[in-house]
Amino acid sequence: MYEPDDKMISLIADNYNLLESLGRFGINLGFGDKTVREVCEDQGVDTYTFLVMVNFTINGYRSMDDNDRISIPTVLHYLKASHEYYLDYQLPNIRKELKEALDENDNLARLILKMYDVYAHEIRSHMKYEEQNVFPYVEKLLNKEDVGDHDIDTFSKHHGQITARLRELKNIIIKYLPSDTQRNIQLTAVLYDLYKNEEWLGQHSEMEDEIFVPAIRRMERMSKQNDVSAKISKMISQNPDNSETLSDRERDVIVSLVQGMTNKEIADHLCISINTVITHRRNIARKLQIHSPAGLTIYAIVNNLVDISAVKL
């Protein structure tokens, strides 16, 4: 497992595939003998998140505590850059190589190219779905904007590797490989690229499923907790001086209510009629804009009308 004080060049020497990943993190080459920590800090990348993703990709290592410290913006930047690289460079480049390697006058060759186009379309549609739905949703969470009733699972169930068509395509190419030496060499090179890209797509998918989605779930839970806290705080602070506008009798009614008394019990306790209790409750709701027993309980505790130990929770 790689650590922050390991030299970045050592990671690349051990795993040359990291060269492709560095650019997706926004890390440029030319960092000399600097450590991973130094390179990440110099280039504005979260060191912890970088190492989590690198160690997961290389060794399959992942700690259960990773979700607590993952930098969502770092992961989001990486995923967006990965999509851009794959859609704008890899898919078109492989198609170009495939077209050059095939005999355009051969019906089977045209079929192979058509199969690749269908496969590429499905990959593109999947990634575009994430770009148009998942990534904006996560950005709204980060910006503390309203996301409605959506959650990451709404989108992640659309997520899945599109491997069947690629497997079929590779098998046909292997069977098709012509006896012509030059075309054979070209198709073999394309086949190698297809295998490499299948491996990359698998890692990309696993990284989303095992790192990105769990981290978003945690952020959703934290967001919901903060939203509840904010609503309670807002409710409490809406009328900070309202305790002064309540009559002594109205305060007595609130105390009785939060202690769990019924209207009749309150009437007997305060020696007033049930209709008077109802009138007091109506006035309390109007003055405080609090209509639920839970809300009145919070109000009474915060304003020191009752001790929490005296409240029936």
Image: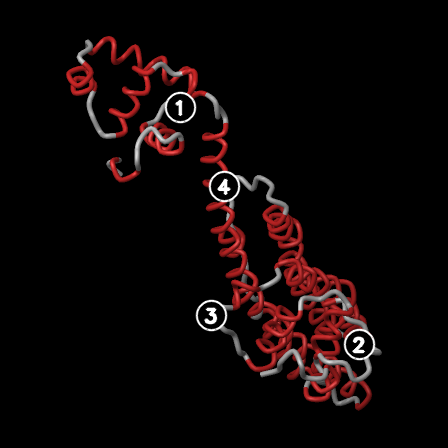
Q: Closer to us: mark 1 or mark 3? A: 1
Residues 282 and 19: in front is 282
Q: In the rendering, at what x and y percent does residue 313 appear? A: 26, 39
Q: In the rendering, at what x and y percent does residue 28 appear? A: 81, 72
First in sequence, mark 4 or 3: give its number.
3
Name the amino acid type tagged 4: Asp
Name the amino acid type tagged 3: Met
First in sequence, mark 1 or 3: give its number.
3
Q: Are marks 4 and 3 in contact (CB under 8 Å)?
A: no
User: Mark 1 and mark 3: span between their CA atoms?
Assistant: 42 Å
User: Mark 3 and mark 2: span between their CA atoms?
Assistant: 52 Å
Residues 15 and 52: in front is 52
Picture disc at residue 227: 4
For residue 146, say whether it is visible: yes
Residues 201 and 4: in front is 4
For residue 157, say whether it is visible: no
Residue at mark 3: 64
Residue at mark 1: 290
User: Mark 4 and mark 3: span between their CA atoms?
Assistant: 26 Å
User: Mark 2 and mark 4: span between their CA atoms?
Assistant: 61 Å
